[in-house]
Amino acid sequence: MTPDLHACLSKQIDAERAGDLTAALEWHRAVPMFSRGRHRTMLDRLTAAGEELPEWVWARWIAYLTMRCQDGAAGAVMRSVLTDVVKTAHGDLLDACYDDGGDPIKVAGTVMGESWLYQQIVVHDAGGLVEFIDEHVTGRLAEHADLARSWAGARMSGYEMGRSLPGARLQVRDAGQDDWTEVLDLGARSCSADGWVLGRLVPSGLAETPMFDVPPLGVPAEVAHAVAAADNWRDPLADALEAGTPSRCFLREDYELCTDVQELDLIRFGTATADLGRVMGQLRSGRDEGSRAAYRVLHRARDGEIDPTEQAYVAAAALFPRALADARRQLVRPGEYDVWAAWAQQAASPAHDRLLVLTEAARAAA
């Protein structure tokens, strides 16, 4: 990049760490090679969600920036963890890269961007979150840092997914306990493998309702139980890798802040089975199939074709700016105020606020 583009990147990073998402997006747009990509999408959705984001979204944003930080003490933590995780947890990817004559830097990039193991270790186990807050968080973002700080070192365990309840609540049960706990329902059931996940429950800032610090990782039941019983949560996963589990099982392409529903899962939910192969091919070619699927989900929600227990998919769909704008133009009809109000009532903010956009549009159309 040219010196001018490097300056834009520096200003973007400063704005992100100060909590000025609008300015961060503007500086990001000034760099032509950043016109696409997950980070751009994340900034687009956050700014579209409005200024009054819940505290837990800011906390997730801080954790996300921790994983990307490459300067100062927090950057040293990141580089150390990345080197270790690439060699140990994802050594099979590195071996395959060398066998194919590939670039090991790309493996490191994949691990940094997609490895749930790397993300959890650098943020929590290695102390990166606290280092990042102490060293880099400024301005408005510093006003939201207390909740993120309280997440540092939260216990990892395996959880069984239960029922979704009214008011964006989800029942989960620690694999080592008998009682069910109600958590904020952001769609963690969509992450599960046969009803089981690994994750950390942390304060959400909403009364006494906990939440997962990031969308949890789906695992088999036996892995969830092993992690819940282990003194070190990483030991059962190391055993699984040694036994031949591909490390790709700990990778996922998406990283969501405002929902636990991964974009690929939303696409699957919002696409007819017969069309899924074609849609996924178009997604790989660069087409925005996420927004199209989100619109279809909102369409089905309006027509009463989605069970209320699947509210997390409707909430996730409302977070796509393009889908919400299209729904406001094409799906809102007079007399449907109660339909959208009911879905808004089932969702946590910021999705709740986005669905209220359709509620108010229906009121105005009446």
Image (cartoon, rainbow, N blue to C red):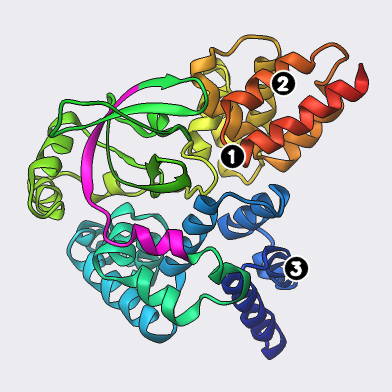
Which one is in front, 351 or 43?
351
Give the magenta range.
146-162
Amino acid type, label 1:
Leu
Q: Residue at label 1?
A: 283
The quadrant in which residue 42 appears is bottom right
Q: Nearer the viewer, mark 3 or mark 1?
A: 3
Q: Is residue 63 magenta?
A: no
Residue 215 seen in this snapshot: yes
Q: Secondary structure at mark 2?
A: helix
Mark sitting earlier along the chain (2/1): 1
Do residues under tags 2 and 1 come within 8 Å of each other at their CB atoms?
no
State the residue at coordinates (55%, 30%). 267
Which one is in front, 86 or 139?
139
Residue 256: image x %, image y %?
50, 47
Q: For mark 1, does the 10 Å Cα neighbourhood hold few (<14), some (14 to 19), or many (20 or more) residues?
A: some
Q: Is residue 154 magenta?
A: yes
Residue 10: image x %, image y %?
62, 82
Mark sitting earlier along the chain (3/1): 3
- Position of the C terminus by quadrant: top right
State the residue at coordinates (24%, 50%). 247
- Position of the N terminus by quadrant: bottom right
State the residue at coordinates (52%, 49%). 257
Q: For mark 3, does the 10 Å Cα neighbourhood hold few (<14), some (14 to 19), or many (20 or more) residues?
A: some
Q: Residue at label 3?
A: 26
The quadrant in which residue 33 appears is bottom right
Q: Residue at label 2?
A: 340
